Amino acid sequence: MRLDKFLTECNLGTRTQVKEILRRKEVSVNGKTMTSPQEQIDPKKDQVLWKGEKLTYEAFQYFVLNKPAGVISATKDQLSETVIGLLPEGARKDLFPVGRLDKDTEGLLLLTNDGALAHNLLSPKKHVPKTYLVQLEKPLSDKDMKALEEGVDIGDETPTKPAFVTKAKDTDVEGEWIHLTICEGRFHQVKRMLEAVGNRVTYLKRMRFGALSLDPLLGPGECRALKIEEVELLRGSRSVIEEKRHMIEGKKAVIFDLDGSLVDSMWIWGEIDKEYLGRFGITLECREEIKSKIEGMSFHETAIYVKETYKIPDSIEQMKADWNHMAWDKYEKEVPLKPGIPDFLEGCKRNGIRLGIATSNSRELAENVLRVHGLLDVFSCVLTGSEVLKGKPAPDIYLEVAKKLGVSPCDCLVFEDILPGICAGKNANMTVCAVADEDSQDNWEEIKKAADTSVFDFFDFFDF
């Protein structure tokens, strides 16, 4: 690669500006000052410094954007702001949006300069799924849902391919809401599909594209670079879906751990640990000092450990009551379901798969969080670590849930996010799937290795 091209793609400026930088002798390659823009270098092997700062070349960049309404999904537009203007400083100049969202549509948009990946994601032959959160003008009848799931005439040569529809349960805004998953990319497709069944879209937000879900930490107009594992997931979107469907095939029961697996709640316990110990003048500099000790313990066992380790004067029952009280407000208002859970549970219901909970949390919190999300009646069995002889990694809790569900352990699929829980499921002779969670990202590789397989979300386990 020519040196001036390398410097340009590292965002040091235009070719003309780069020539001026070289003329000023600000660039060195492997310790030798360079002035010629035609100099050939190997970006993978040569060390290039600008003013003593190492430059890193990225042939491809990948960003996920939470597109706001009012912005155009294009690289240039004479009248309106484009999504390119929302990219961070340092982003390559040749990035483009993969597909498009209408000007008034919000949500997940991928931007990259990787043409091969974009082609694979957009190719009609690949049938890459896209999931939208849709607000409707009026309720969607069962008949209309069935029509969407079978395919509808939207005025094109052929009807739409079968879609997947569920009533949305993850919005606090009043109105009629659904999740709609399609595997095509026709012009204004979602809006035209709803019009075909006599309804109208009043709000539209893309929540998922292939194996990538919208990051809940990204506000409208915010973006971030994709992680390596997210890029790999996108590259293998179809194989990821096939693996999920193979995983659930033939299973008669699914057993969830609660925190970090069914709901995104692990983060709250770090805050509670610090706040609670702070009441007794104890400063918790690093939560890892307690986290690694209590993973897998029941709620009761955790209280005993904390009381003995930190010399807490309160009774065990008072400690548990205080923790429940501290946690409940966060569980009620700030803890969402893991991405895709409503769709997954609906798929289990349709396929006659029984559902259970095996949690180390307290029964009070477990039942309350299920009630908040309207799931208490969905699960046939909820069992806590305090109700069995040994906690995780012992298999007791999983074996007991399987027994109550009336299903053999070998016919059960377990979802867990921490190592002791994964070991408990494996010790129970069950298929165990590791669920990615931000709280356990530091030992994610170890967790994946211990499990049979792993997922980042719960979409696409079931066919449309």
Image (cartoon, rainbow, N blue to C red):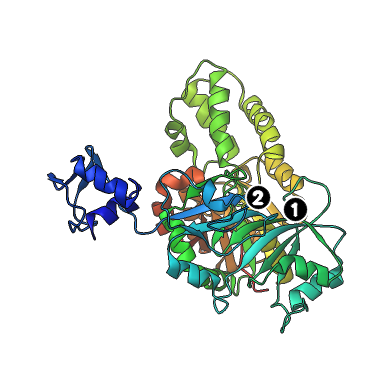
Which residue appears farthest toward the top when viewing the image?
281
Marks 1,2: beta carbons within 8 A: yes
Is residue 129 visible to us here?
yes
- Along the viewing direction, whichever of 444 and 163 lies nearer the viewer: 163
Q: CA distance from mark 1 to mark 2?
A: 9 Å
- The percent coordinates of residue 327 (x first, y second) are 65, 33
User: Would you place residue 229 above or below residue 281 in this image?
Assistant: below
- Along the viewing direction, whichever of 123 and 235 lies nearer the viewer: 123
Q: Residue 169's mark?
A: 1
What is the three-letter code of the residue carrying label 1?
A: Lys
Is residue 428 visible to us here?
no
- Say which residue appears at 72% left-offset and 45% top-offset: 367
- The percent coordinates of residue 310 (x first, y second) are 48, 22
Considering the numbered disc 1 on the image, is that residue within a helix, a strand or a loop? Answer: loop
Per the image, the residue denoted by label 2 is 337
- Along the viewing direction, whichever of 82 and 318 lies nearer the viewer: 82
Quarter of image, res 94:
bottom left
- The percent coordinates of residue 125 (x first, y second) are 55, 79
